Image (cartoon, coloured by chain):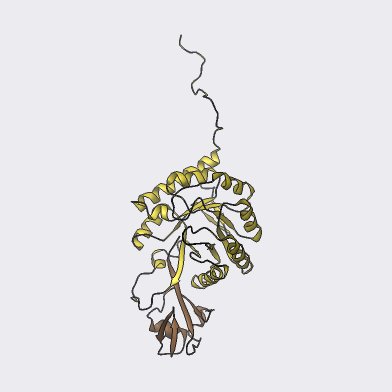
Chain colours: A brown, B yellow
Amino acid sequence: MQLQVNGKALSLNGNTVADLIGQMELTGKRLAVEVNGEIIPKSTHPSFTLKEQDTIEIIHAIGGG
Amino acid sequence: MNNDAFLLDGKSYQSRLLIGTGKYKDFNETQAAIEMSGAEIVTVALRRVNIGQNAGEPNLLDFISPDKYTILPNTAFCYTAEEAVRTCKLARELLDGHSLVKLEVLGDQKTLYPNIMHTLKAAEELVKDGFKVMVYTNDDPIVAQELEQMGCIAIMPLGSLIGSGLGILNPHNIRIILEAANVPVLVDAGVGTASDAALAMEMGCQGVLMNSAIAHAQNPVLMASAMKKAIEAGREAFLAGRMPKKAYASASSPMEGLIK
């Protein structure tokens, strides 16, 4: 399915948030995920099913003051 | 000095120096500077993961472990209360329910001066939602009081503009804020060198938060060491209570028994 991930179009071979994280080779990293503006808790990544054209933000910590 | 702990959000810290993790050459330098500074609380920013980044690309939190340090996520580059609240919620999810945040809502890119209207709005919302808010603000004593009454756990007025290194431009206002505050007051932003940090501590600030002063020094690790000492020296001077200033001389050697 086609998704918008961090402002870019991405084609996902799978259905869940966990599938998306896996496809992006980010499994096991410290991340936070938002789908259509709603935070999806880590514990539900394997069960949360995405829909065509969902807007997703995947964020992590970087250096900052 | 061991019994002079810095208490914040129910935790006790030995260090009163809080440092940022931005602008370093690489994560190794970040890590070395933090280690040298003795800081126990370090700030981080939240950003989008780069799509297509190397799977093996190092992550800041692999170097600065949340098991070892208290991670203080900030809301840098948020210009509205909504953006700041959203960022804090993402930080809480990222850090497994951690509720301590540094709120900063900025007014414009040139000054990075806080937008107080949005800062107050975001602070109120975050406190209601259970966040422990350390708030970056201007040096207005009335705003500081408002933020404290809302339930912010630390008030962090700027010494001068973020990244400017101009030091504490209005120590009189910081003093007024300190006099009225019942929560920790930390100078956040503007520190350029060790004497700036020592001055903040001598005035009675509970701590100092800095990033550029260390990261942009010619030798960041050495400056981290200098800042550690400045914070400790300033704190001890505050606790010791300085001598009164006098207009005229006061001899240190006795007059009595003078050789004639």
User: Looking at the image, which residue is at 58% across and 64% down?
Assistant: B118
Is B142 positioned to the left or the right of B196 in the image? right
Q: In the rendered view, would you say B234 is above or below B115?
A: above
- Out of B184 and B7, give the one closest to the viewer: B184
Seen as rendered, the residue at the extreme top is B260
Numbered label tally: 0
- Out of B109 and B233, give the one closest to the viewer: B109
Seen as rendered, the residue at the extreme right is B149
Q: Quadrant of residue B247?
A: top right
- Out of A47 and B126, give the one closest to the viewer: B126
One can see residue B80 in this view: yes
The x, y position of residue A31, in whole percent, is 45, 74
Is B33 positioned to the left or the right of B200 in the image? left
User: Looking at the image, which residue is at 46% across and 69% down?
Assistant: B46
- Out of B67 and B150, give the one closest to the viewer: B150
The x, y position of residue B246, in whole percent, is 55, 29
User: Looking at the image, which residue is at 38% across and 69% down?
Assistant: B59
The x, y position of residue B33, in whole percent, is 38, 55
The x, y position of residue B44, in whole percent, is 45, 64
Q: In the rendered view, would you say B42 is above or below B201?
A: below
One can see residue B14 in this view: no
Is B51 positioned to the left or the right of B238 in the image? left
